[in-house]
Image (tube, rainbow, N blue to C red):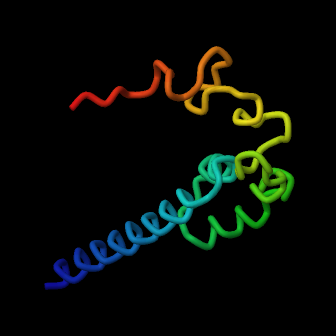
Amino acid sequence: MFQAMTSHGKCGARARDYEQRRKVKKFVMRLKPSLRTRLLESDPRTLDEALNTAKSTPQSVVSTASEKPKCVHCGKRHGADLCWKKAGRCLKCGGKDHRIRECSRLKKFIP
């Protein structure tokens, strides 16, 4: 009977450990790629460890999309000289010699 209780305790600990790992993974996967990579290198086992590591990451690594100005031509956030729409490039691949209608990378609709 004592052995049954100890094995149940191990299963409970495993379940709690699994649940903690699942929460950490869910948290990490919602982060930006640069921060995600840094967190995965430290291999946090608990959510508290992951949060502390994320907080201690220098702010220069964490960049937000709002730092880049919104383009007046297409409405996306990118550098001013990178707008494909303004440059007349293909909006699928960025090619200069054609537009999106003629793009070879665009899947053709066949009824």
Q: Is residue 100 left or right of residue 96?
A: left
Residue found 75% across the figure and 55% down from its top: 65
16 or 10: which is nearer to us?
16
Residue found 76% across the figure and 46% down from its top: 73
60 or 73: which is nearer to us?
73
Q: Is residue 90 left or right of residue 64?
A: left
x, y percent for residue 7: 23, 74
Q: Quadrant of the C terminus?
A: top left
x, y percent for residue 1: 13, 85
Q: Is residue 89 left or right of residue 6?
A: right
Give the answer, above or below, for where 83 lies relative to 34: above
Which residue reaches farthest top? Answer: 97
Residue 59: quarter of image: bottom right
x, y percent for residue 95: 63, 20
Q: Is residue 31 left or right of residue 7?
A: right
Give the answer, above or below, for where 83 lies relative to 7: above
Residue 107: quarter of image: top left
Q: How many marks?
A: 0
x, y percent for residue 71: 79, 49
Residue found 60% across the figure and 19% down from its top: 98
11 or 64: which is nearer to us?
64
